Image: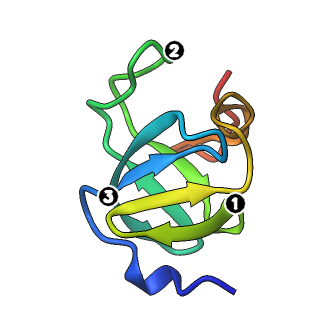
Amino acid sequence: MVDTAKIKEHFEVIGADGVHVGTVDHVEGDRIKLAKNDGGDRAHHKHHHYISLGLVADIEGNKVRLSANADVAITFEEEKDGKAAM
């Protein structure tokens, strides 16, 4: 089990494939809140998205590695209201 308490602001979130998913704003409950200005080409990139802590596979230095590839992890993202981002 990964010690998610080690996740800090500004850590990079990457998929299992090493592709950038976002940057940690902070941990909120059982989710990682991603910085809203780090949305890249994702739809609705001007507000926060969330990644479940259940997807965290490892913490490597200042990077949070997910158990899913980036393109799959993005489909699991949630917006502030809890709806899946598409």
Q: How far apart are marks 3 and 2 (CA)?
A: 22 Å
> Can you identify the residue that label 3 sits on?
11
Specify whether 76 is left or right of 77: right
Q: Which quadrant would residue 73 be assigned to in this image?
A: top right
Please state the horizontal and vertical placement of residue 12, each as a whole percent of the image: 36, 50
Residue 43, which numbered label?
2
Q: Which quadrant would residue 8 be assigned to in this image?
A: bottom left
In the depicted structure, whether residue 9 falls above or below residue 20: below
Residue in the picture at 49% in, 70% down: 59
In the depicted structure, whether residue 11 falls above or below residue 74: below
Q: Distance between the residues labelled 1 and 3?
A: 15 Å
> Can you identify the residue that label 1 sits on?
55
Specify whether 23 is left or right of 56: left
Callout 1 amino acid: Leu
Residue 82, which numbered label?
none
Along the viewing direction, whichever of 81 and 43 lies nearer the viewer? 43
In the depicted structure, whether residue 2 falls above or below residue 55: below
Q: Earlier in the sequence, mark 1 or mark 3?
A: 3
Residue in the picture at 64% in, 39% down: 17
Callout 3 amino acid: Phe
